[in-house]
Amino acid sequence: MKRASWACCEISLLLAALLAAPAAAADRARVVEADVAIEWFDTQTWPAWPREIPPVLDWHHVQLPYVGLQRKPQAGERHFARIWVRLADIAPADPAPRALAYSAYLPTGFHAVFYAEGRQVFATNGEMSNGWNVPVLIPLPPSGSDARTLVAAFDCYVGSLGCGVPSFQLGSLAAVSIWHEWQKLLRIDGPRVGSVAILIVGAFALLTWIRRRSESVYMLFFIASLLWTVRTLHYHLPRYPLPEAWFWWATVCSFAWLSVAVYLFSFRLQGERSPRIEKALIIGATLSTVLGMPPIATDDYWLFERLAYVMQALISLAVTVTLTAVAVKRRTPPDVVLAIALWIMFAMGIHDLLLLEWNLDMERVFLLPYAALPLFGAFIFSMSRRYRRAIDDIENVNASLESRLEARQRELASSYKQLRQYEIRNAQEQERERLMRDMHDGVGSSLISTLALVERGDAAPSMVAQTLRDTVDELKLTIDSMEPIDQDVVTLLATLRYRMTPRLESAGLALDWQVNEVPRLEWLDAPAALQIMRIVQECFGNILKHAQASRISVACSADDGVVVRIADNGRGFDVAAQQSAPRGRGLRNLEFRAREIGGRISITADGGGTRIELRLPLERRARPR
Amino acid sequence: MLSVLLVEDDARFRELVAAALSGVADMKLVDAVDTGGAALAALQRTAPDVLLVDLGLPDMSGLEVIRHCAAAHPQCEIMVISVFGDEQHILSSIEAGATGYLLKDALPTDLVGQIRTLRAGGSPISPVIARQLLKRRWSEIRSDGPPAENLSERERSVLGLVAKGYTFPEIARLLDISAHSVTTYVKRTYLKLHVNSKTEAVYEARKLGLLRD
């Protein structure tokens, strides 16, 4: 038999060999010789197995695995065979329970029956499981029986794929069971688990696609995972879920469409499109789907299948080469990984095609169930890379946003600083102007006029003292207006009272102080504070000079503004007359000062005294310059 | 007999003080000097009961003299002489260790009375200073520093009423305490401020490595 060097692809077998317990292997031997006899039948229904081995069989000695029936029968030759296999000298060396097992990809027969010493000891009962890929374990009769030979009969459809007899594993039940389990893992469980894993990744892709319809790569991946599951059913399913012909049709078609999906997906993953190849793939898949349908398929279904596989192999090669060229050109990791995955897939497919054509040992494990793994690995690699990129991008965007924000903040801070400096300069300028004006009008002019009087020599000392005292008061008022009163009218009034208490007390005036907490007035800066102080001081001054009062009450409260009320119990005066009198400057002055700070003043007087109410707004529009 | 030391660079003012104290039986002006250096020497020599000190001295700030006096003669009452009694000067004097202040223009009439009041434990306070004291973050406790002296509830209410312009007798009435207690609350506040500023200075110095533990 031609043995291609596919050793590199047989990772799974190597793994199995490594993992198989060496101790158990010692209790197990491979039976590679047997006597074989073949009965031919015309119909698809084999006669029932005889209760005993037919006495007339044309036995001849062969090496196992026996592949003598792979040739397609010529016209006129019969297609249905019952292969009799006789294993001689299976007598137990020790009384431990023993077993026989075999496993092969190729059809070893759809049904098999085993005889020990002429009596049936085991019969397969599956539809597809026993002659097809599924390893079989046959417990042998207890060692008490003196069975020395074992005879098996395989019913085979030699048809187009041919038939063969595998070698057997014979030994203790434990050792053979381990071998059998490993075979099951590789041939049945592995593909099964792989299918489930791929379906899960497919579900992820589907969910992604539902939210991102424009990215067809996800949908294609989902379709591929579904088709893959259908395609691999025949490796591990214990029963046909459909009528046998339709099941095989679905298996072959799903493979065709799987190729379409896989290659469309691969092209999209790489961002390259080849409309021609895509069209060819779709036409090919459609053709094989239609032509393969059981009602119109040729009698020789296996021929159709074989043709389909060869065609797909050629298309796969073309696509793989195309995408490899892209990968070589671009040299980006996802492209390279995808190309490698496609080559691995292609190699596995060729391996199985060769196996199908009897070019390889019929006991090899079928590799295509594993072929999806590299491809799906490439998909996951590509997706995780995209995901990483996306996160990196977001982080970069965040970082750049942050740095832009910082830059804006710096700009803002610097322009704010400039504004502040300008404001400070402006405020200093205004403050200087104000102080100059105050010095000029207040302290300065008082001092100058006092100086003039003193120099003329006609100033009474008491008058000089009074003028200087007024000047000092004026100076104190100016300084107090600059104290940190925190825009609080109450503190302002309190400061004024603190200053004036000695004066009021010496004049024998009692002060009734009724101040409540009032809201801060944001607009209350030093010039405004000075205006209020002057208003209140002037009121006190007027009371001291004119009112002949014994009691002053000062109250401060808030409603829609801050209200300061100053009342005395003096003799009062005619407000209207005072206001219109040419010398009534005092009252007009008060009104002017109140207006200056956006407030209002109202004065009422009668025989019971004078009441002055200063009303200050809570908020104030820009001060007129 | 109360001994009074005057530190003032204005000669006329020194004369006024001397005149004001000359007729008082239980007070004696032990010295009147015009520089910070002379003041430190005089403090050492005379250990007065009351120190009257101007802030603007030719050779050093009056605050230096106050600090020295508060450290070396804790029993001495320190009274700052100020023209306007403005918040900035008064508060830094109190932090340095002063417990009273004297307005220059009130001097001839009331100097003796004010010295007596101060000796009796009463400190003057203006609404603006009361407000600033209330605004201060008293209880700021540093994990590695000494605990700060905090204001008591009473001290806070006294300061609050002062800030609103109420006089000591009015406050006494409102809080139902004696007028004398009101002034001692104020003085206690001043002392706490001084202690805090002192520990703060130590803390700052230690932080800068100027002092060892």
Image (spheres, coloured by chain):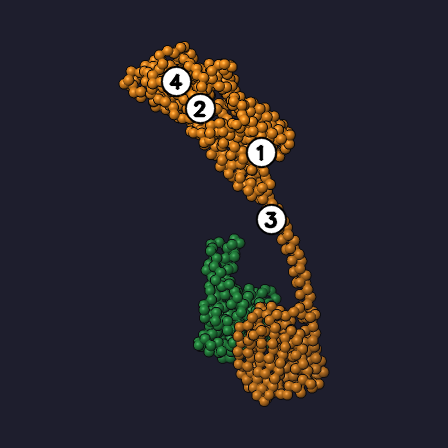
Chain colours: A orange, B green
The front one of A573 and B187 is A573
Mark sitting earlier along the chain (3/1): 1
Quarter of the C terminus of chain A within the rendering: bottom right
Judge from the rendering whether residue A299 lies leftward or rightward of residue A33; answer left or right: right
The front one of A291 and A330 is A291
- Identify the residue position indicated by label 1 in the image: A265
Which mark identifies residue A402?
Answer: 3
Badges 4 and 2: C-beta atoms under 8 Å apart?
Answer: no
Amino acid type, mark 3: Glu
Q: Quadrant of residue A83?
A: top left
Mark sitting earlier along the chain (4/2): 2
Amino acid type, mark 1: Phe
- What is the C-alpha distance between the residues marked 4 and 2? 15 Å
- In the rendered structure, the residue with mark 2 lies on which chain? A
- Identify the residue position indicated by label 4 in the image: A153
Mark sitting earlier along the chain (4/3): 4
Query: Which residue: 49% across, 32% down?
Result: A229
Badges 2 and 1: C-beta atoms under 8 Å apart?
Answer: no
Judge from the rendering whether residue A461 lies leftward or rightward of residue B1; answer left or right: right
Q: Quadrant of residue B62?
A: bottom right
- Identify the residue position indicated by label 2 in the image: A132
Query: Which residue: 54% across, 41% down?
Result: A208
SS at badge 4: strand
Badges 4 and 1: C-beta atoms under 8 Å apart?
Answer: no
Residue that sits furthest to the left in the current view: A144
Amino acid type, mark 2: Trp
